[in-house]
Amino acid sequence: MLQIRRVSMPNQKPYAPSWTNHFLDWLNSLPIPIWLSIALIYLLAVIAFHSAYWIEGALPFGALGSAELLVNGVWSIIGIAFLLFLNRSAAAAIDKFSVLVPQRKKELEMLRYQMTTIPSGVALAFTVLMILVIGGAVYFDPTFLGSYGLGNPISMAIMLSVGTFSYIFAPLMIYQGIRQLVLVTRAYQLVEEINLFRLQPLYAFSGLTMVSSLFWILILNLDLVSNYATLAQSTADFAFTVLFGLPNLLLAFATFIVPLWGIHRRIQNKKEKAIEENGMQIEKTHRTLYALLKKASYKKTADIEKSLASLYRMREQIEKVPTWPWNAGTLRGFLSAVFLPLGIWLAQQIISRFL
């Protein structure tokens, strides 16, 4: 069950929590698993979309609509799931990371609060903005929230309510996703010394970046899936879809790599320094060995040879220390998840236009 630990701040909170945090806390407080709450919200959204079409007469009462209505229902829960998983991953990462900086509890608890709490003013501003944008879009294009123009006030109110609820989370996802990644960089700045043989706590935030990246890929794929059913009507539509898919693609790459880049460089520098120190010791030991051989002090050479063997084994261990929290296979899987559906969609579009 996705439960976010709320920590009482030692001082006054830097800002009040947003309505989204209160809403997510309410979902977590329900006596049912959080995944069931999300599933019920999706089901309600799909029923609401169908009800609007039934009232409008666009569909016979009780009849199921196209797959578009099912896909549209996903947008009503993607933002909720994104923020829930992002907050849970951030809280868990702070717990794992805290062993590296036990003397910085105050800063860590502040970071925990910031990573799991959207400022109320920011959320309110984005909410009002999206309500105005969606209202204007529907006013100028009645088909904005559906394949049919809605004229009945009740059906329009239903579509507007569900559509607005879904779209409101879009800017909040982007804001909190990017904000968390900035805070990850700030958390790494608390680490003064890096231990090459105790790196797991440093990789605590890799789960957070992975969750964020996977959600951006999921959103990109959902957008492409909605285009599989019907081909783009014009080259302009095709270019529009590609253009607005690029930000999700860039966010996926950025959230996967950028927050870990700073600590990766610090580990790499530490590793290079350790290898250099090891090389200096090997060189020094070689000189000692040559001096003993020159003096024909063969009894002492055995100990020197053992020291050399230990130094070379230590060098191998240092060279094997990873500087990224994932291996090449994980990176290949990530790239496949991004480019495979995108490649299929592009091939579909190109074939439909030129063949």
Image (tube, grey):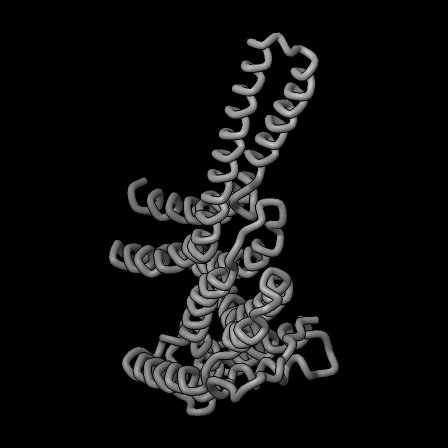
Q: Quadrant of residue 83?
A: bottom right
Where the N terminus falls, by quadrant?
Answer: bottom right
Residue that sits furthest to the right in the current view? 31
Q: Position of residue 153 (x, y in %)?
A: 42, 91
Q: Residue at x 56, y 48 (%)?
A: 325
The image shows residue 297 at horizontal and vertical percentages of 64, 11
Q: Is residue 295 above or below residue 342?
A: above
Q: Residue furthest bottom?
A: 153
> In terms of depth relative to the viewer, which is nearer, 119 or 201?
201
Q: Residue furthest front?
A: 295
Residue 212 in the figure: left or right of residue 3 = left
Residue drawn at (51%, 66%), measured in percent from left and top?
71
Tell me what residue is drawn at x 50 percent, y 70 percent.
Answer: 75
Q: Between 22 and 351, which is closer to the camera in this rendering? A: 22
Q: Can see residue 219?
A: yes
Tally of numbered tags: 0
Q: Is residue 229 visible?
A: no
Residue 191 locus on image (x, y percent): 52, 59
Residue at the image point whose x is 53% and y is 76% from the top: 110
